């Protein structure tokens, strides 16, 4: 999920023992203000050294001061692992988000990048690249020839990823990864993308699934 500048400094103050939810220790307002200003300075220094974290600077040159609720601009990520499952990926095109939302994750959550109401992948409306990875472990029935897994992303020009596997492999490890150059107010930001998965050759039984999206 998106982190505010206040989130970042409270985490730092907690590490220093100056703030705690457990002991109801409140952070001093002046300490928060000072820490946010220090955060801006530190990020500027890192950027000058070529370290780019996507931090969103406050326009202090025009008299605007950074506030705790300001978006930090640092990365947002969905990472979900489903282990010990038995999920059939059919030969017919299937909505991936619809399939995953019926499962209980071992860790992580589909939010914020996978919309389980509209069953699609969504992005933040920012000029930032979205990285995507889907890892699946499982098997095709013995003797299945021409086996492959494909994942199609809807859009103005649909993209399809395909991973082919040798029929001699007993346990199949499938990796489908790509990236999207997101434009602020662009097609992907406005519409999202439907993810359609399909097993070729025969239905595939997945035992472990990991899905990651990061922007």
Image (cartoon, rainbow, N blue to C red):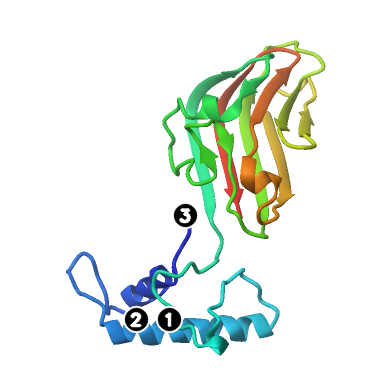
Q: Residues within 10 Å of mark 2 (few under 14, many from 20)?
A: some
Residue 193 image offset from top left, x and y in percent: 65, 37
- Kindly identify the residue that appears in the image at 62 percent across and 82 percent down: 46
Residue 86 left/right relative to 161: left
Q: How many marks?
A: 3
Q: Position of residue 43 (x, y in %)?
A: 56, 80
Q: Are marks 2 and 1 in contact (CB under 8 Å)?
A: yes
Mark 3 → mark 1, Cα distance in angstroms? 19 Å
- Classify mark 3: residues with Cα within 10 Å, few (<14), some (14-19) or many (20+): few
Whether residues under marks 3 and 1 lie with C-beta atoms below 8 angstroms apart, the answer is: no
- Residue 37 lies in quadrant: bottom left
Provide the residue designation for mark 1.
36
Q: Secondary structure at mark 3?
A: loop
What residue did someone put label 2 on?
32
Whole-Å distance between the Cαs marked 2 and 1? 6 Å
Residue 70: x and y, percent?
45, 70
Relative to 57, residue 174 above or below: above
Q: Name the residue rendered at 80%, 37% in the picture.
A: 157
Q: Residue at x 51, y 37 (%)?
A: 115
Left or right of 54? Residue 30 is left
Mark 3 highlights which residue? 1
Q: For mark 1, give the secondary structure.
A: helix
Residue shown at the point (49%, 83%) measured from the top left: 64
Q: Position of residue 2 (x, y in %)?
A: 48, 58
């Amino acid at each position: 999920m998106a982190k505010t500048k206040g989130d970042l400094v409270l985490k730092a103050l907690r590490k220093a023992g100056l703030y705690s939810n457990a002991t109801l220790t409140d952070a001093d307002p002046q300490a928060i203000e000072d820490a946010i200003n220090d955060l801006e300075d530190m990020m500027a220094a890192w950027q000058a050294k070529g370290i780019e974290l996507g931090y969103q600077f406050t326009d202090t040159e025009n008299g605007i001061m950074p506030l705790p609720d300001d978006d930090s601009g640092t990365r947002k990520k969905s990472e979900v692992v489903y282990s010990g499952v038995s999920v059939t990926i059919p030969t017919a095109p299937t909505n991936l988000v619809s399939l995953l939302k019926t499962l209980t994750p071992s860790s992580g959550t589909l939010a914020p990048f996978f919309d389980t109401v509209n069953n699609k992948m969504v992005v933040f409306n920012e000029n930032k690249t979205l990285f995507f990875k889907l890892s699946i472990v499982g098997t095709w029935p013995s003797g299945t020839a021409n086996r492959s897994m494909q994942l199609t992303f809807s859009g103005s020009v649909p993209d399809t990823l395909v991973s082919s596997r040798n029929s001699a492999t007993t346990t199949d490890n499938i990796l489908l990864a790509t990236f999207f150059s997101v434009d602020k107010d662009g097609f992907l930001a406005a519409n999202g993308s439907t993810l359609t998965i399909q097993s070729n050759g025969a239905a595939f039984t997945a035992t472990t699934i990991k899905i990651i999206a990061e922007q």
